[in-house]
Amino acid sequence: MSARTKARKLALDILFAAELREERPTDVLAQRGRPNQDELAEFAHSVRIVEGVQEHAERIDELIATYATGWTLERMPAVDRNILRMGAFELLWVDDVPDGVAVTEAVKLATELSTDESPRFVNGLLARLQQLKPSLSL
């Protein structure tokens, strides 16, 4: 498993926990403590994702709500909601992660951690955002 894949899993854990606890993601991140030397690379990317999702949360949720046909944010499973937030952040605000990688990694997380229908849903929504990316105001 690559360092960035591990970083995405850690970021998802933090975002999910923050939502359940009704805390700011960066506060949950701070509670985790400092990583050991072997975890530094993945931890740095996790921090970037968590901080980015928190910074752009309002716009990310607006985009998800707009393009999630037939689903409200509240009705989505919490894990899917947070996978979509991470994927949207990487897709729209992280230039050094190729769009296809952002989508693929989000789909892999959904496959591993959510329902049987979730990977297709995550793929479809993020692919739509990828398609619309040039016209979205961020």
Image (cartoon, grey):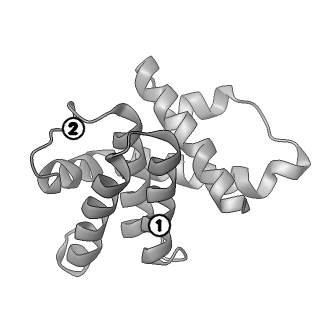
Mark 2: secondary structure: loop
Question: Which residue is tagged 2?
Answer: 73
Q: Which mark is residue 104?
A: 1
Residue 12: image x %, image y %? 53, 42
Residue 91: image x %, image y %? 40, 68
The amino acid on which the numbered mark 2 sits, given as a three-letter code, is Leu
Residue 136: image x %, image y %? 19, 71
Whether residue 104 appears in this view of the structure is yes
**Above-or-below relation of 136 to 85:** below
Mark 1: secondary structure: helix
Quarter of the image where one finds residue 1: bottom right
Quarter of the image where one finds residue 5: bottom right
Cβ–Cβ under 8 Å for marks 2 and 1: no
| Image quarter in which the C terminus is found | bottom left
Q: Is residue 112 left or right of residue 125?
A: right
Residue 65: image x %, image y %? 17, 47
Whether residue 138 appears in this view of the structure is no
